[in-house]
C-alpha cells in the first residue's frame, strides 16, 4: 500500500489506532458529532432522572398546552409532557439504531466472509441473494418485513437489521476477497489453518476500520428507518414514546398545536446529523491513503 | 454491446429468481392464518375456512403454492387484493402514474440543486462555497424527509396559506393545481437526493480535475471555463448519470412517507394502507413491482453508461 504516508507515523512510534485517533480529533466537526452522540446516549441512559414528568401520564386538565416554563416543549393531545417524551424517546431511537445495526453486522459479516473466503457456487449464491435484497429499496423492504412480522419495536429492529445486512455482506466479502490474495493469508493457509480461523484471525481485524465507518453511517440510516416505521405505526407502540410516533400524532394537530412537531423531529435530525458527522470523520481518520496535510 | 447486455441479463435473471423466493417467503412470516383473516365474521365456520384455503391453494404443499404464484406473476397476475376486490396489478398500475409524476418532479429538483452544487464545490475546493455546499448536503441527508414535509406544511400551508397541505389533482385535469399539490412533496423528496447527487458530482469532478487531460488542457492555455465545462464535466457526469438513475429508483421508497404526509394517492399510500388493512397480496405486489422497477433502472443505468462513455463502445 502507500508506504510513503505510513513511514512518518511509524518513525514516531505511533500505532495505527493512535494515528487514527489523532486524525479523528483534528476533524473538529466529527468531534462535535461525537459529543452530541454521547450527550444523546447520556440522555437515553438517564431518562428516568432527567425527565421532569412521567412520559405516559395523561391529564385531561392540560391538553395541548403551548410551551411554558413548566412544560418547555408544551403538552400533547393527551396532556403528556413533550419534553419528557422526547427524553424517553431517545431510548427507543438509539436502541433501535444500535441494536439493528449490530444485528445487521452479526448477520452480514460472517456470511460475507464465508462468501469471500470460500468462493465458487456458495459465493455466487450469497452474492445473488444480497443483490436481490439490495434491489428492493431499503424502506419498502423494511416496511414489508415489519408488516408481515407485526407492529412492534422489536420487529421493526429485526426488519431493519435484515434489510441493512446485505451492505455488510458485500463489504465483508470484498475485504475477504482482497485479503485472500495477500501473502499473509496465503501463508496462514499454507500452514494448514482452516477457513474459519483465517476469517476470524486474519481477515476480520483488517475489516474493522471500514466496518466501523459503515456501521456508524448505518446507525444514522437505521434511526431514520425506525422513526419512519414508528411514524407509520409499525414500530414503537403507543403509549410508549418514540420520536417517529410522536410526529405521527403531531401531524394531526398542526394547526392548533404546531409545537408538537418541532421537538421530536429536531431530535431525530440532530442525532442523525451527529452520527453522519462521526461516520465521515472516522472515514477520513481510518483511510490509510488519506494523510492530506 | 450485445454480449454485455446478455451478460447483464445472465446476472439479473438469478437475482430475480431469488427475489421471487424472498417475496413469496414473506407470506410465511405472516402472523396467523390468512384464511381466518379473510373469513372475517365467518371465521368460526370450518367449511368457509376450508373453501378459502382451497381457493388460495393454502392446502397445497409450499412448492406447489410457489409455482402457482410465480406462474401467475409471470403472466402479469399479481393476485387479488383482499380488501378491495381488485387485481393487485390493476391497483399498482392505477397508482403508479401519480408516484411517477412525483418522482420525476423531485428528480428534476434534485438534479437542478445537486449537480451545480457539486460542480461549484469541486471547483472551489476547501473554500467557503465548498463548505457551504457540503454543509447543505449533509443537512439534506440527515433530515428525515417526513419531518421536512411536516415543517413545510406548517410554514407554507398553516402559517402562510400559500399551498394546499394535502390532496392531489391529476396533471391532465388541472396542471396548475396539480403542480401546486405536488411541489412541496417533490421538494421534500428531491432535497434528500440532491445531497447524494451533490456528493457524487463533487467526488467525480475532483477525480476528473486531477486527470492528465485536464492538466494538458490547462497547459495548452485553455480558459479555465472551457477546461471545467468541456473537459472535466463531460467526464465527471458519466458516473453521476449512472448513480442518478439508481437514485430515481430510490425515490419510490422515499415516496412512501412523503405520500403519507401529503395524502397523495400514489404507490406509497397504497402500500401503507395495505399494511394496515393486512392486505398482504398488495404488500407483496408492491415490493415485487418496486424491485422490478429498480432492476430495470439499474439496467438502464448500465446502458446509459455505455451510451455516454465512448471509451466502452468498441469493447
Image: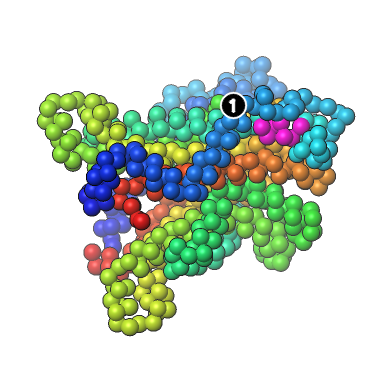
Quadrant where the N terminus of chain B is found in the figure: bottom left
Say whether residue A33 is magenta: no
Quadrant where the C terminus of chain B is found in the figure: bottom left
In percent of the image, x 69 and y 41: which residue is there?
A: A263
Q: Nearer the viewer, residue A80 or A12?
A: A12
Q: Dividing the picture into quarters, in which one does residue A117 lie? A: top left
Q: Residue furthest right?
A: A61
Viewer can see residue A112: yes
The residue indicated by pointer 1 is A45
In percent of the image, x 43 and y 69: which residue is there?
A: B123
In percent of the image, x 24 and y 32: which residue is there?
A: A202
Q: Nearer the viewer, residue B171 or A225?
A: A225
Q: Residue furthest left?
A: A190
**Percent from the top left, x then y, of residue A196?**
25, 26
Q: Dividing the picture into quarters, in which one does residue A39 lie? A: top right
* Magenta stretch, overall SS: helix
Say whether residue A84 is magenta: yes
In the image, the segment drawn in magenta is A81-87
Badge 1 marks a residue whose secondary structure is helix
Q: Nearer the viewer, residue A3 or A116?
A: A3
Amino acid at each position: 500500500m502507500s508506504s510513503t504516508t505510513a513511514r512518518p507515523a511509524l518513525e514516531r512510534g505511533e500505532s495505527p489506532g493512535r494515528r487514527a485517533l489523532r486524525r479523528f480529533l483534528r476533524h473538529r466537526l466529527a468531534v462535535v458529532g461525537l459529543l452530541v452522540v454521547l450527550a444523546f446516549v447520556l440522555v437515553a441512559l438517564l431518562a428516568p432522572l432527567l425527565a421532569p414528568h412521567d412520559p405516559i401520564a395523561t391529564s385531561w386538565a392540560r391538553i395541548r398546552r403551548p410551551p411554558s416554563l413548566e412544560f418547555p416543549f408544551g403538552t400533547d393531545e393527551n396532556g403528556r409532557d413533550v419534553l419528557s417524551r422526547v427524553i424517553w424517546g431517545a431510548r427507543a431511537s438509539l436502541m433501535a439504531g444500535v441494536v439493528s445495526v449490530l444485528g445487521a453486522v452479526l448477520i452480514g459479516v460472517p456470511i460475507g466472509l464465508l462468501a469471500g473466503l470460500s468462493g465458487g457456487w456458495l459465493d455466487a449464491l450469497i452474492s445473488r441473494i444480497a443483490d436481490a435484497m439490495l434491489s428492493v429499496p431499503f424502506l419498502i423492504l423494511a416496511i414489508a418485513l415489519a408488516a408481515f412480522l407485526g407492529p412492534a419495536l422489536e420487529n421493526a429492529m429485526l426488519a431493519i437489521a435484515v434489510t441493512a445486512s446485505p451492505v455488510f455482506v458485500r463489504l465483508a466479502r470484498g475485504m475477504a476477497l482482497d485479503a485472500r490474495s495477500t501473502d499473509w493469508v496465503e501463508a496462514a493457509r499454507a500452514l494448514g489453518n482452516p477457513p474459519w480461523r483465517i476469517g476470524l484471525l486474519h481477515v476480520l481485524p483488517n475489516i474493522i476500520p471500514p466496518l466501523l465507518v459503515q456501521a456508524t453511517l448505518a446507525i444514522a440510516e437505521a434511526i431514520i428507518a425506525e422513526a419512519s416505521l414508528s411514524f407509520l405505526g409499525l414500530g414503537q407502540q403507543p403509549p410508549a414514546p418514540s420520536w417517529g410516533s410522536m410526529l405521527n400524532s403531531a401531524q394531526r394537530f398542526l394547526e392548533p398545536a404546531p409545537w408538537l412537531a418541532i421537538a421530536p423531529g429536531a431530535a431525530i435530525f440532530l442525532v442523525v446529523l451527529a452520527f453522519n458527522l462521526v461516520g465521515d470523520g472516522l472515514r477520513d481518520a481510518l483511510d490509510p491513503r488519506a494523510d492530506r496535510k | 454491446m450485445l454480449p454485455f447486455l446478455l451478460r447483464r441479463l445472465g446476472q439479473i435473471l438469478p437475482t430475480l429468481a431469488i427475489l421471487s423466493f424472498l417475496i413469496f417467503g414473506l407470506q410465511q412470516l405472516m402472523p396467523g392464518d390468512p384464511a381466518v383473516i379473510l373469513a372475517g365474521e365467518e371465521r368460526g365456520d370450518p367449511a368457509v375456512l376450508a373453501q378459502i384455503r382451497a381457493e388460495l391453494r393454502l392446502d397445497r404443499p409450499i412448492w406447489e403454492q410457489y409455482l402457482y404464484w410465480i406462474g401467475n406473476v409471470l403472466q402479469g397476475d399479481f393476485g387479488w387484493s383482499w380488501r378491495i376486490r381488485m387485481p393487485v396489478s390493476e391497483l399498482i398500475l392505477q397508482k403508479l402514474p401519480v408516484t411517477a409524476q412525483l418522482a420525476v418532479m423531485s428528480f428534476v429538483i434534485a438534479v437542478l440543486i445537486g449537480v451545480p452544487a457539486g460542480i461549484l464545490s469541486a471547483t472551489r475546493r476547501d473554500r467557503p462555497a465548498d463548505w457551504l455546499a457540503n454543509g447543505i448536503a449533509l443537512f439534506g441527508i440527515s433530515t428525515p424527509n417526513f419531518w421536512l414535509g411536516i415543517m413545510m406544511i406548517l410554514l407554507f400551508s398553516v402559517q402562510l396559506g400559500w399551498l394546499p397541505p394535502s390532496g392531489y389533482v391529476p396533471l391532465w385535469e388541472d396542471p396548475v393545481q396539480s403542480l401546486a399539490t405536488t411541489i412541496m412533496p417533490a421538494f421534500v423528496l428531491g432535497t434528500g437526493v440532491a445531497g447524494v447527487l451533490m456528493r457524487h458530482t463533487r467526488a467525480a469532478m475532483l477525480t476528473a480535475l486531477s486527470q492528465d487531460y485536464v492538466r494538458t488542457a490547462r497547459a495548452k492555455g485553455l480558459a479555465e471555463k472551457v477546461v471545467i465545462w468541456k473537459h472535466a464535466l463531460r467526464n465527471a457526469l458519466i458516473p453521476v448519470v449512472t448513480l442518478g438513475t439508481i437514485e430515481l429508483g430510490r425515490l419510490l421508497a422515499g415516496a412512501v412517507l412523503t405520500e403519507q404526509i401529503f395524502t397523495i394517492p400514489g404507490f406509497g399510500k397504497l402500500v401503507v394502507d395495505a399494511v394496515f388493512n393486512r392486505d398482504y397480496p398488495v404488500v407483496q405486489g408492491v415490493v415485487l413491482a418496486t424491485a422490478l422497477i429498480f432492476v430495470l433502472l439499474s439496467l438502464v443505468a448500465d446502458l446509459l453508461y455505455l451510451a455516454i462513455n465512448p471509451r466502452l463502445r468498441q469493447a
